[in-house]
Image: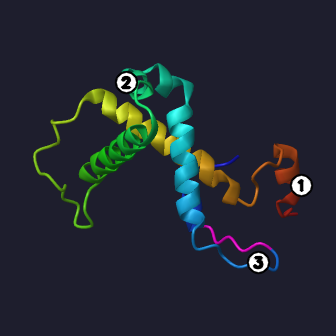
């Protein structure tokens, strides 16, 4: 029942008697990145194994540069508002495996943002009970 491609960042989040946390999006992005890097599929990939050889600050910098690279990949493959691509003629300087990483990062972000869906954690029966009934 929940749309996996719904952008949960567009849902206003105002819990009872609390205000919006300005750093909420930053914290959610960091959590999604952690989920992405700790994913078993990523850990078993070539890049994940290479990343595991690094320690401390070097590892954090490598992770940040990899996320920047994936964000750039996504930007280059997203059409502009006028319908044209950022780089006409296609983007052939990326390895095909990079698109798999980009898809996994997108899924990790969507999993993190699901909690802002008003139906998050509810069973299908409970959601059905909450829907307005028509006669």
Q: Main secondary structure of the magenta part?
A: loop
Question: Which residues, given as a range, are shown in magenta?
Answer: 11-15
Crowd tier of the residue under label 2, counting other residues whose Cα lies within 10 Å: few below 14, some 14–19, many 20 or above:
few
Pointer 1: what residue? Answer: 129
Quadrant in which residue 47 is drawn: top left
Crowd tier of the residue under label 3, counting other residues whose Cα lies within 10 Å: few below 14, some 14–19, many 20 or above:
few
Pointer 2: what residue? Answer: 50
N-term mark: 1 or 3: 3
N-term mark: 1 or 2: 2
Q: Position of residue 93 (x, y in %)?
A: 16, 36
Reply above or below: 90 against 49. Answer: below
Please tell me whether residue 12 belongs to the stretch shown in magenta.
yes
Q: Position of residue 11 (x, y in %)?
A: 62, 67
Q: Residue drawn at (47%, 36%), measured in percent from left and top?
A: 104
| CB within 8 Å, label 1 to label 3 | no
What element does badge 1 sit on?
A: helix
Pointer 3: what residue? Answer: 18
């Amino acid at each position: 029942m929940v749309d996996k491609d719904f952008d949960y960042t567009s849902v206003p989040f105002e819990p009872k008697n609390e205000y919006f946390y300005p750093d909420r999006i930053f914290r959610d992005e960091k959590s999604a990145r952690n989920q992405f890097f700790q994913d078993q599929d990523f850990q078993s990939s070539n890049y994940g194994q290479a990343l595991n050889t690094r320690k401390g600050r070097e590892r954090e910098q490598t992770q940040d540069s990899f996320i920047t690279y994936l964000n750039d990949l996504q930007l280059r493959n997203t059409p502009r508002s006028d319908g044209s691509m950022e780089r006409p003629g296609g983007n052939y300087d990326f390895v095909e495996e990079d698109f798999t990483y980009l898809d996994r990062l997108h899924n990790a972000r969507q999993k993190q943002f699901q909690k802002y869906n008003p139906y998050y954690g509810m069973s299908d029966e409970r959601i059905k009970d909450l829907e307005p009934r028509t006669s």
